[in-house]
Image (cartoon, rainbow, N blue to C red):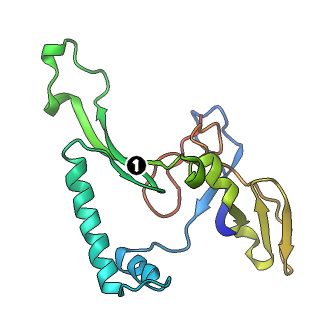
């Protein structure tokens, strides 16, 4: 089973309804760049060398951006769909005729929706079932927790209790929202 590392942190947002409560936040152990991913793929019984895989991934990246900028969605079977959304400036335009891209649009975002077909479902609710959760505070004696709630310790160390937390898209307190790479520090609480 895959290992998802997390730490439990307190919500200190003064405006939050759940200020003072504790939530799980994912912790990344490494950022895989294109070259490292290409090497990893080529080591999985591939007939293609790292350089060939790297070339295909680089071409995919540039073509993905090109297609998104042509208002197309890009579906990768078994993975999900990339698409764009628009972020407007607060307040909007008073009249349709007054709307201006330069005044009223704030950003163009690239979004990703995971595959939800039954056999390859990697939506948040299904993806969490495939992972084993490890609290980083207890790495001395690895404490593992599955989404189902079972816990086991391997080795000696801390008896820190954990919180598996789930990011099911609802953001009802513990889920992470949006985000860039690395640690999920940009967490929104309801």
Q: Residue at (78%, 67%) from the top-left corner?
A: 144
Look at mark 1 in the image and give the residue it sits on: 81
Picture quadrant where residue 87 is located: top left
Q: Residue at (44%, 79%) from the top-left corner?
A: 41
Q: Residue at (13%, 14%) from the top-left corner?
A: 97
Q: Secondary structure at mark 1?
A: strand
Q: Report x, y in % for residue 89.
A: 28, 30
Pick the quarter of the image with the C terminus. top right
Q: Report x, y in % for residue 142.
A: 78, 74
Judge left or right: residue 75 versus residue 187. Answer: left
| Towards the viewer: 94 or 127 | 127
| Towards the viewer: 88 or 61 | 61
| Towards the viewer: 16 or 151 | 151
Judge left or right: residue 146 versus residue 28. Answer: right
Picture quadrant where residue 4 is located: bottom right
Judge left or right: residue 105 versus residue 46. Answer: left
Q: Report x, y in % for residue 80.
A: 44, 51
| Towards the viewer: 136 or 15 | 136
């Amino acid at each position: 089973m895959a290992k998802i590392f997390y730490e439990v942190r307190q919500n200190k947002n003064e405006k939050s309804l759940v200020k003072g409560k504790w939530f799980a936040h994912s912790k990344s152990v490494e950022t895989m760049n294109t070259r490292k991913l290409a090497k990893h793929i080529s080591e999985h019984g591939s007939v293609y060398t790292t350089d060939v895989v790297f070339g295909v991934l680089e071409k995919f990246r540039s073509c993905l951006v090109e297609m998104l900028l042509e208002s197309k969605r890009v579906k990768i079977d078994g993975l999900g769909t990339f698409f764009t959304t628009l972020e407007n400036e607060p307040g909007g335009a008073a009249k349709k005729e007054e709307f201006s891209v330069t005044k009223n649009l704030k950003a163009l975002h690239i979004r990703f929706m995971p595959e939800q077909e039954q056999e390859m479902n990697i939506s948040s609710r299904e993806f969490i079932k495939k992972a084993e959760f490890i609290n980083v505070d207890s790495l001395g004696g690895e404490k593992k927790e599955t989404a189902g709630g079972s816990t086991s310790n391997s080795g000696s160390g801390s008896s820190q209790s954990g919180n598996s937390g789930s990011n099911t898209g609802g953001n009802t307190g513990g889920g992470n929202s949006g985000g860039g790479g690395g640690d999920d520090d940009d967490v929104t609480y309801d």
